[in-house]
């Protein structure tokens, strides 16, 4: 079940990022957004991989809304 939830969080986070013209990358336990102009934006950091997408999703929702 945990894997299914993580997958849904990942999909939602990626959609929010794409709607805001960025892609998400991971560096260890940190998420960054890269915009078309090449700028990099720190998105989130987690203490473990299982929560990394949830942390990123929550950060993106706060910054860009839940569109």
Image (cartoon, rainbow, N blue to C red):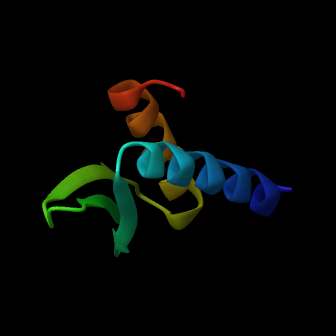
Q: Position of residue 28 (x, y in %)?
A: 34, 75
**33 and 4: which is toward the camera:** 33
Q: Tell me which residue sits at (39%, 26%) in the image.
A: 62
Q: Residue at x 33, y 29 (%)?
A: 63
Where is the C terminus found, in terms of image quarters? top right
Give the residue at x 38% y 62%: 23
User: Which of the 4 quarters of the picture holds residue 45?
Assistant: bottom left
The picture places residue 26, in percent across and down from the top left corner, at 37, 71
Q: Is residue 33 left or right of residue 66?
A: left
Q: Is residue 4 in view?
A: yes
Quadrant where the N terminus is found in the figure: bottom right
Question: In the figure, 25 relative to 55: above or below?
Answer: below
- The number of numbered discs placed on residues in the rendered structure image is 0
Residue 66 higher or lower than 13, as above or below: above
Frontmost residue, 53 versus 49: 53
Q: Residue furthest bottom?
A: 28
Extreme residue in the right direction: 1
> For this view, does 9 lie left or right of residue 23?
right
Residue 40: percent from left, percent from top: 17, 61
Judge whether residue 29 can be spotted in this image: no
For residue 65, what is the image quadrant? Answer: top left
Kindly identify the residue that appears in the image at 32 percent across and 63 percent down. 30
Vertical side of 61 occupied by 19: above or below: below
């Amino acid at each position: 079940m945990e894997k299914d939830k993580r997958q849904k969080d990942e999909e939602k986070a990626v959609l929010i990022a794409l709607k805001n013209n960025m892609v998400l990358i991971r560096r260890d336990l940190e998420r960054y957004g890269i915009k078309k102009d090449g700028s990099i934006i720190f998105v989130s950091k987690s203490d473990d991989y299982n929560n990394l997408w949830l942390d990123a999703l929550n950060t993106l929702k706060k910054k860009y809304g839940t569109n």
